[in-house]
């Protein structure tokens, strides 16, 4: 506790939250009298906070802090991820062009994360995915061979993390001038240094980019050519003319990666699915199929089922479900952090088929952002979940 204002006497603090997953066991502390600029600690009576076992990984729990003294109260707020943030964006380039765009895109879809220009090499365990923009020559950044950053990223992968990395030279040319060779870790090879002929960029049939087609308006110097080199690696984006690989997705078994040689910020948005948001969403879906806590119950009755049609949708979809037994049924919509967005059904229902529409609105009647959502059907002794993709 630091006092930035006038001298205060009898300072006490109360910690509070209305988060459904969090319980505050020790919510108060006393700091007595504090002069201007003074600091105090409450080690003798620490705040104690507990998250339930079913809290979704990456769920952002919000708290308020009320500091009271003889002259009145001051209220502030903060949030802490339970488990891990969904993502970290690292952009160490000179022009900082694509990192902020990636951060904005992921945040707009409900994922929580952090943007940095220096990689926190000792704190990567706080994130489920890392998104890296190394830029295009001549505003690129070279990750040194066996540098702190390189070794920390390899350790992150070996611990089961997922990484998206983009850069025009990081796969081929940089490896010849002292740059770290990430190709094996990303299940790819770069057969050619390439030249300034990137665009248009198109998806590959049978992959999560099928149907995508982008014009490219980003920096366009020396774009490395990419090809899959390992089992579990798939070419997901290629250049239109001349044809060569631009992005490889790799499911290594214990971790997943996507390596690209263009900048996401350079893609020109068209109509869905050819938008930056849809591409980022499909990559995140490849990395994190279902967040922990959304579908962690055992389905006691295999006849329980739930499906959305159409899916993806904008803004309306119909949830069709089978209730296996008579009883109370709860059907809710949750975001990727596990927050309840909308209750569609909470009532006694007979066994049998049912249907309920969702119009992309939250409980207050406000439109929700594009992104991944989850519908969850619960009964007395069963549950069933379905992933929804809202694309605007």
Image: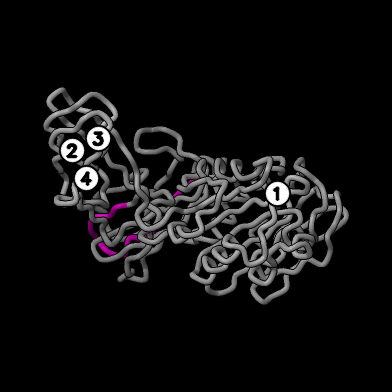
Query: Where does residue 371 sit, x and y in percent of width and height?
Result: 51, 46
> Quadrant location of the C terminus?
top right
Look at the numbered disc 1 and give the secondary structure of its residue: loop
- Residue 135: mark: 1
Over which residues does the magenta segment extend? Answer: 317-330
Quick one: label 4 or label 1, which is nearer the N terminus?
4
Look at the numbered disc 4 and give the secondary structure of its residue: loop
When asked about the image quadrant of residue 163, the answer is: bottom right
Residue holding disc 3: 38
Quick one: label 2 or label 4, which is nearer the N terminus?
2
- Which residue is pictured at 37% across the width and 44% down the height? 341
Q: Provide the major secondary structure of the magenta segment.
A: strand
**Taking 356 as reference, is 212 left or right?**
right
When asked about the image quadrant of residue 217, the answer is: top right
Residue holding disc 4: 41
Residue holding disc 2: 13
Separation of marks 3 and 2 at Cα, in angstroms:
15 Å
Separation of marks 2 and 4 at Cα, in angstroms:
11 Å
């Amino acid at each position: 506790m630091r006092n930035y204002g006038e001298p205060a006497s009898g300072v006490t603090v109360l910690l509070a939250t209305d988060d459904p997953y969090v319980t505050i066991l020790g919510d108060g502390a006393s700091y007595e009298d504090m002069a201007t600029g003074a600091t105090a600690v409450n080690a003798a009576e620490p705040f104690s906070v507990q998250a339930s076992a079913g809290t979704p990984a990456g769920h952002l729990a919000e708290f308020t802090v009320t500091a009271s003294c003889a002259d009145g109260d001051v209220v502030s707020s903060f949030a802490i991820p339970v488990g891990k943030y969904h993502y970290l964006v690292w952009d160490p380039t000179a022009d900082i062009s694509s990192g902020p765009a990636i951060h904005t895109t992921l945040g707009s879809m409900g994922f929580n994360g952090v943007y940095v220009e220096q990689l926190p090499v000792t704190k990567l365990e706080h994130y489920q995915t890392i998104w890296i923009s190394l830029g295009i020559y001549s505003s690129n950044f070279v990750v040194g061979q066996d540098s702190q950053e390189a070794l920390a990223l390899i350790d992150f992968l070996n611990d089961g993390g997922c990484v998206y990395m983009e850069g025009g030279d990081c796969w081929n040319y940089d490896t010849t001038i002292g740059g770290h060779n990430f190709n094996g870790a990303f299940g790819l090879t770069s057969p050619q240094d390439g030249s300034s002929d990137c665009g248009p960029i198109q998806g590959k049939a049978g992959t999560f980019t099928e149907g995508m087609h982008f014009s490219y308006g980003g920096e366009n110097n020396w774009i490395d050519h990419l090809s899959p080199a390992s089992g579990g690696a798939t070419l997901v984006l290629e250049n239109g003319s001349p044809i060569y690989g631009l992005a490889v997705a790799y499911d290594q078994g214990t971790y997943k990666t996507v390596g690209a040689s263009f900048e996401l910020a350079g893609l020109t948005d068209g109509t869905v699915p050819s938008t930056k948001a849809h591409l980022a969403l499909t990559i995140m879906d490849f990395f994190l199929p279902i967040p922990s806590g959304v579908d962690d119950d055992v389905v006691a009755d295999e006849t329980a089922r739930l499906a959305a049609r159409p899916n993806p949708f904008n803004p309306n979809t119909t949830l069709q479900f089978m209730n296996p037994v008579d009883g109370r049924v709860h059907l809710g919509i949750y975001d990727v952090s596990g927050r309840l967005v909308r209750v569609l059904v909470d009532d006694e229902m007979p066994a049998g088929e049912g249907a309920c529409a969702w119009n992309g609105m939250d409980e207050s009647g406000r439109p929700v952002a594009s992104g991944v959502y989850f519908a969850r059907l619960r009964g007395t002794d069963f549950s069933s979940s379905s992933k929804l993709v809202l694309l605007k």
